[in-house]
Amino acid sequence: MQQNIPEETTSFVGRAAELARLAEALREQRLVTLVGGAGVGKSRLALHALGTAPSGIGSIYWADLWPLRSDELLAATVADALGLSDHTPRIPLDALCGWVADRAVLLALDSCEHLVPSCRHLVGELLTACPNLTVLTTSREPLGAIRETVLPVPPLAPATEAVALFQQRAEGVGRPLRGLAEQRLAAGLCARLDGVPLALELAAAQLRHHTLAETSDRIRSGLDLLDDPDRSAPDRSTSGRSAPDGPAPDGPSPGGPSPGRSDSGRSDSRPSASGPSRTGSGSSGGSPPGDAPSSGADAGRSGPGPSGIGEELRRPARHSAVRTAVGWSHELCRPTERLLWARLTVFPAGFDGGLAEQVCSGGPLTAGELRSCLAGLVNKSVVTVEGGRYRLLDSIREYGRMWLRELGETEQLAARHAAAVVELSRQARTEWPGARQQAWYERIEELYHDVREALRFLLGTDPEAALELAGNVAFFWVCCGHLYETHHYLELALACTEGSSEARTRGLWSLGLARVLQGDHESGRALAEQTRQEAALARNEEGLRGAAYLEALAALLAGRPLAALATADAALRDTGRAPEPASGSTLVRLARLFALTGAGRLKEARREAEALRRECVRLGEYWTRSYTDYQLALIALFEDRPGPAGAHARAMLDAKRRIGDRFGIALGLELLAAAQAREGEPERAALAYGAAAQHWEIVGHPQRGTPEVAPLRDEGQAAARARLGDAEYEALFREALHADRDEVLARATRPAPESSR
């Protein structure tokens, strides 16, 4: 059974009734939506329910939708959550339907509220095509889909579960409740916050800096102010923006008290370069994030139910609770912490401290001050941290974005973020042939959402930079299975730019590579020719080598090794050997090696493979090395040397695992299985063939590779079946086919004990 459920990092409190209702709904219904306001705990309830689900429920997958700004890559995001690495020309939705098919799958889509119409369409298509699929969504409003079961998620019971949660979180910050008086204060605070978990978490975090009595008093004063219509009614005559060079307007900003209004009645100045001004009103500090319109279906509405001015005054108490808790956390931050809070909202998903420093420093936020502020925001539970990566929760991010707009820094921060991502992509491309290759594969995958956000911004502001970025990450993305995103952004960037440039040459080549790997060899060859023409005009020898590799690759996959060999030889002759390391020269040499094997020139192929592998080992490079091991395994099988073939196949698989190349893993597993069948290990061969079949399904092909591999596959499967019998072979094959993909890979590649040989 597959699972990709995020780990719960804090204790789960209460919700027994909600968990029981959710478990029953998931047993009986195919589409269940958890609906509730901001901060009420929808995602956490879903996460805990799935984490404790019975083993017979099928494979469980979790897709975070909150990093998406639009729906253009919604299906691709869900496919990525399922671990698909589709190498076909299909659109992602078709790939999803094709892979899930009749599998028993429970798919969770978290944070659908800003993409409601698109999520409704996606879920409808999936449920129609996949009879054993169950979908669980979380949203601030129902999807409105046919046969959708909507389960409201209320706040925690203030007198019991809310107090228990607050008490646990207070202990977690080193301020356990002591005595009956503090128990009563805590109960009162939980009641005022209406049992909303996010509000309780933020309030408990403030116990690091304030007493429980101080915390309770400030929360109470904040809610009293928000409940006063004369102070909290929105002023629809203004935009809610502070004046450029003067005090904030007396009226509140959209949906809440003005950012400049304090609880003493004075009006502070607008946010400055040192950070948003200290807010008051017990600290709402601005528009309530829980009620801010989303970019999707919620846009233009002030909240659930009928829109209109009066609706602002009819919000349930829990909205005020979230507004007050988030706003008060904002007020208690130092000015530079508030500035960093606002700037961190430029990141679409998780981020690390180094990138935050690169993008968000400036003005009063020196490198040292930024690190101090980031630690302070973590201590206040404004920023969460896990495994060295940081994240803002949705409601807190929305609040920070409002402040970033007030500061007038939205465009500036987006530009800085995009520039930082482009610079990282340049480093990644430059260092690809060397010892940092594996680290860059991991880094580019971590930056997946950042790259998409930077591309989205640059396509509207600097298409040339967008083209450079898309070309720089393309080789990493196609290796890790993001072929759809690769050609999507490259096509957009190429359409927005014109004229010759190194970025355009690389962009055409990268698009051609994606097309070839998707099986569109004709389009790949046409793009190889365009790449060659662009490179010739610019006298770009690296571009010429890239074009030759692309043409040779298309010929190899079409079963024309002699044509591939001629292309590679011509490229190496006409351009000469580039100073090492150089990716274009290495790729052409690799294509030539494949062509030699395909043409039956095995001794020459083995000699060149061993030489190229030694260079890769010296450089600390994995991608090319993995394919030299692939060729050495293939050559050893042709020469009936199954022992060395198995060793090289395992080495290949180790390298492919390091860089996340599922396509390469499928290729390597087939050679390993063939070697095991030749060595008289039919059980291990059957498992390896089943694991290979699983990975071929992940990449969307029944089987791929150069044509000379097919006879080895047929021979190995027949030998294993003959030794085991059809029933035992099928049982082992299917066991591997449906096992956890990483576990079965580890099991298949584990060397056999000496005694069993």
Image (cartoon, helix red, strand yellow):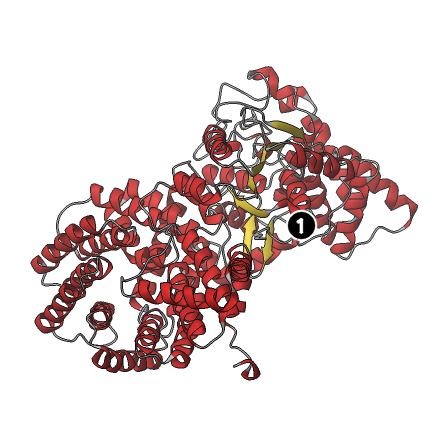
* In-front residue for pair 404/438: 438
Q: Which amino acid does the dot numbered 1 rest on? A: Ser
In the shown orientation, is residue 511 left or right of residue 642? left
Horizontal and vertical percent position of residue 322:
66, 35
**Mark 1: which secondary structure?**
helix
Q: Percent from the top left, x then y, of residue 679?
A: 44, 77
Image spot of residue 535 (x, y percent)? 12, 59
Determine if residue 634 is in view. yes
Say which of 654 and 580 sits in front. Answer: 654
Considering only vertical position in the picture, is 31 above or below 711? above
Identify the residue under disc 1.
55
Q: How many marks?
A: 1
From the viewer's perspective, is 170 left or right of 627?
A: right
Seen from the viewer's position, the closer of residues 606 and 318 is: 606
The residue depicted at 73 percent of the width and 28 percent of the height is 224
Dot 1 alpha-carbon crowd within 10 angstroms: few under 14, some 14 to 19, many 20 or more: few
Question: Residue 498, image x and y in percent?
Answer: 15, 45
Is residue 669 visible in the rendered image? The answer is no
